[in-house]
Amino acid sequence: MTIRPILIHPDPRLKKLCDPVTELTDELRATAADMLETMYDAPGVGLAAPQVGVMQRMLVMDCIKDPEAKPRPMVLINPEVTWTSDETNTYEEGCLSIPEQYADVTRPAEVKVRWMDLEGAAQEEQFAGLWATCVQHEIDHLNGKLFIDYLTPLKRQLITRKMQKLKREKARL
C-alpha cells in the first residue's frame, strides 16, 4: 500500500464528473487500499478517488473516531443516494483537498446509499450523523462538487485564494 498525494484545490480534476467503474480489477482494489491508507494518514474520515487523481466513481470512508473502537473502513464503488430525509443537519465540514479550511454545510440528516463493493456485490445502507454527511461530501467529489460550492461566492473566493497561496508556497519548497 502507498500513501498517495492528495490534490489541492484549485485543481481542474476536482471539478470534473467521474466515470463509473465498469470493471473490478486488481489495480482498482490496490487503488482502494492506497486510498484508505492515505485517508487514515491524512487523517480524514473520507476520501474520493478524484482527490488522488483517479477519475472514477469510488470513495473510501471510516467515520469511527474513537481510538478504542474497531475501525470500519468502507469502499463504495459507483455509489448513489437513493433516498434523503427531509430533516437536515449542519456540520462544520473540512476537506483533505482544502486543508485547514472549515465551514458549516447543511445536508440531509439521513441518506440511503446503494453501491458495489470490491467483490462486485450490491450493497445498500442508511447512514445518519457524521456518516451521512461524509458519504454525501464524498459523492459530491465524484460529481465535481466541493463543500465550498455550498458557501457564498465571497467565502468561496477567499478560501480559493488561500489555497492558491498555499500551492505557491508548496511549489517553492
Image (tube, rainbow, N blue to C red):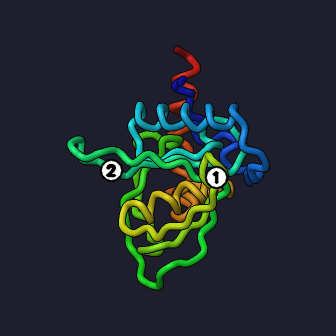
- Which residue appears at 48% of the width and 41% of the height? 96
Closer to the chain start, of discs 2 and 1, is: 2
Please tell me whether mark 2 sits on a helix, a strand or a loop.
Answer: loop
The image shows a total of numbered marks equal to 2
Q: Position of residue 13 (x, y in %)?
A: 71, 42
Q: Which residue lies furthest to the top in this view?
A: 173
Furthest toward the left, the residue is 68
Q: Which of 121 and 86 is in front in this view?
A: 121
Whether residue 164 is visible here, answered yes or no, is no
| Dot 1 amino acid type | Ile
Which residue is the extreme one toward the bottom?
86
Residue underneath mark 2 = 64
**Badge number at residue 39:** none
Q: Residues within 10 Å of mark 1 (few under 14, many from 20)?
A: many
Callout 2 environment at 10 Å: few (<14), some (14 to 19), or many (20+)? Answer: some
SS for callout 1: strand
Q: Nearer the viewer, residue 163 or 93?
A: 93
Whole-angstrom CA distance, mark 2 to mark 1, is 20 Å
Q: Which residue shows up at 58% across the image and 48% down it?
A: 59
User: Does residue 72 lie above or below 112 as drawn?
Assistant: above
Q: Give the x, y percent position of residue 106.
A: 44, 70
- Circle 1 residue: 77
Q: Is 16 situated above or below 7?
A: below
Percent position of residue 67, x then y: 24, 41
Answer whether residue 112 is visible to the viewer in this image.
yes
Residue 5 vs residue 23, the one in the foreground: 23
Q: Which residue is drawn at 41% across and 42% down?
A: 44
Amino acid carrying mark 2 in the image: Ile
Q: Estimate the x, y position of residue 61 in percent, counting from the top left.
A: 47, 49
Task: Locate residue 78: give its quadrant.
Answer: bottom right
